[in-house]
Image (spheres, rainbow, N blue to C red):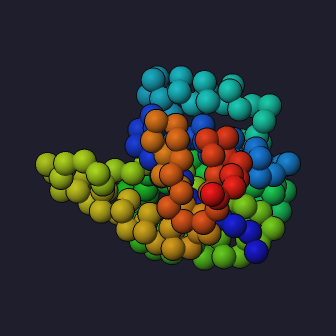
Amino acid sequence: MARHVLILGGARSGKTGFAERFALGAGRRPAYLATAEAMDEEMRERVENHQRMRDQLFTTIEEPLDLPRALLAAAGDHDVILVDCLTLWISNLLGEGASVADAVDMLEAAMTQIDECRIILVSNEVGQGIVPDNALARMFRDLAGSTHQQLAEACSDVYFVTAGLPLTLKGQVVGASGRPVARS
């Protein structure tokens, strides 16, 4: 059974770089499943820059909404799939009026069907700041928190990244390179 991974961290914490190093060390046929949609010029530039940086290393798959279907479809061709990121996926689902709880249940179910491919989920930890001042932001924060809890339970390994350094919350201890380190 594959050891699926959840990587959490704040904005610009180094979580994506850590996830990429982890993925490249975990498989020989990695895919990058991007959930972002380029809705404005700044986001288009970000997406293009990310694609250029990883173009030779990963097969890129773009899917803003149907993450379970995309994972199941890609798992046969890849031995590791990095999903970046769950919080953008949640935003996309909310924008479509979809049930985030149902979508997370379907994602978890899809992950349990994938044995030969490691799934690495990346997400922004948004619950450590102040209580948002509006209902939509509070709902988003709450949905992200419940998503993280559910998927952390389903994953073998969970890491929190800050300043580019991973803290092992559950599972195998790894260094900033994404490679296992010996416990002392």
- Name the residue: 56% across, 73% down: 154
Residue furthest to the left: 133
137 or 22: nearer the eye?
22
Residue 135 image position (x, y, % from top left):
18, 56
Q: Quadrant of the N terminus?
A: bottom right
Asked whether residue 20 appears in the rendered view, the answer is no
Q: Quadrant of residue 172?
A: bottom right
- Name the residue: 63% across, 46% down: 175
- Name the residue: 67% across, 41% down: 177
In the rendered view, tell whether residue 88 sits above or below residue 184.
above
Q: Quadrant of residue 111?
A: bottom right
> Is 72 on the left-hand or right-hand side of 6?
right
In the rendered view, tell whether residue 76 sits above or below residue 180.
below
Q: Quadrant of the C terminus?
A: bottom right
Residue 160 image position (x, y, % from top left):
48, 52
Residue 13 image position (x, y, % from top left):
46, 38
Asked whether residue 174 appears in the rendered view, the answer is yes
